[in-house]
Image: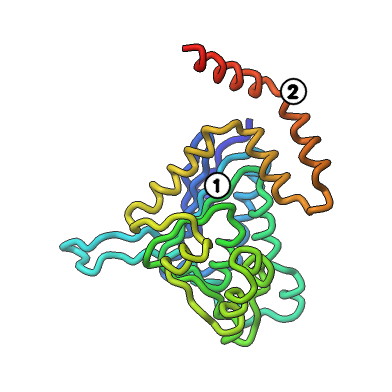
Amino acid sequence: MTEPLNDALFTTLLLTETDDRLDVRLHRPEVRNAIDQAMVDELHAVCAHLESTPKILILAGTASQPPTEENPKGVKGIFASGADIAQLRERRRDDALAGINSTLFDRIAKLPMPVIAALDGYALGGGAELAYAADFRIGTPELRLGQPETGLGIMAAAGATWRLKELVGEPLAKEILLAGKILTGEDCLRVGLITDLVPGDELIDAARALAGRIGAQDRLAVRLTKSVFHAPREAHPMIDTLAQGMLFESEEKFRRMQDFLDRKKK
């Protein structure tokens, strides 16, 4: 059995691990959780762990906090403001060709178990592209999501040019990518980019509730369904048939179906 991740070894992430779930908070609040090389490396370590020990992943940022006497303004939540511009400014052609963020986000998208992104405040640039790589997205009214790359003389090259089109359709994707449109939380819900809109102080609970509903399903069935769902069209229906054949032989299938039949007799 793989050992749990050691939270003390991470400097840009905060981790909470249970038997069936790993909560990961991006934690560079002093720079609005900008994604730098250290965070990329640590997220790769998270992926390696979840590839060997499949669990549901919840990705979140800095949590919002209500006003208090000590801090009358409270704390605004933030997911990720994008790539670290100071590092991005120095990158050249070979860095782009290495696909630093795109390689990571593709790895996250392909994790065996579902990924849930809990989005609050800014989710811009690479932060938005990280969110697109998740299987589920939940947001708050304070969410502001968009791709400001063309205003910085570059393009969104870590998945937005194709994932965003698949998620919201070509016209809106082009407005976000080419005209710098920023979506609010309500906008994201309306166009189906998020599945739920909740207050900031309920965000992580909503993500964990969704993780709980996923966790109540058969783990192997969830893993195979996610894999088959993302298979290319030409792989169907053969891949569906093969995956179903595996599930038809699983002990959990027999147990769950027998439990269902037993409940019907009562």
What's the mark number on residue 249?
2
**Contact check, label 1 and label 2, Cβ < 8 Å:** no
Q: Quadrant of residue 165?
A: bottom right
Q: Is residue 239 above or below residue 73?
A: above
Whether residue 11 appears in this view of the structure is no
> What amino acid is labelled 1 in the image?
Leu
Disc 1 is placed on an element classified as: strand
Q: Nearer the viewer, residue 22 or 155?
A: 155
The image position of residue 135, as x and y in percent, is: 59, 52
Q: Nearer the viewer, residue 178 or 49?
A: 178
Say which label, 1 or 2, has the lower sequence index.
1
The image position of residue 36, as x and y in percent, is: 57, 68
Q: Residues within 10 Å of mark 1 (few under 14, many from 20)?
A: many
The answer to whether residue 214 is left or right of residue 229 is left
The image position of residue 260, as x and y in percent, is: 55, 20
Q: Is residue 258 above or below residue 129?
A: above
Q: Residue at x 66, y 67 (%)?
A: 159
The image position of residue 145, as x and y in percent, is: 49, 70
Q: Give how far apart the Cα atoms at labels 1 and 2 are.
A: 27 Å
Q: Residue at x 29, y 59 (%)?
A: 65
- In the current view of this chain or complex, which residue is farthest to the front? 265
Residue that badge 1 annotates: 57
> What amino acid is labelled 2 in the image?
Glu
Q: Nearer the viewer, residue 232 or 70?
A: 232
Tell me the quadrant of the picture where the N terminus can be found: top right
Q: Residue at x 55, y 61 (%)?
A: 131
The answer to whether residue 195 is left or right of residue 55 is left
- Which of discs 1 and 2 lies nearer the camera? The answer is 2
Disc 2 is placed on an element classified as: loop
The answer to whether residue 118 is left or right of residue 107 is left
Whether residue 255 appears in this view of the structure is yes
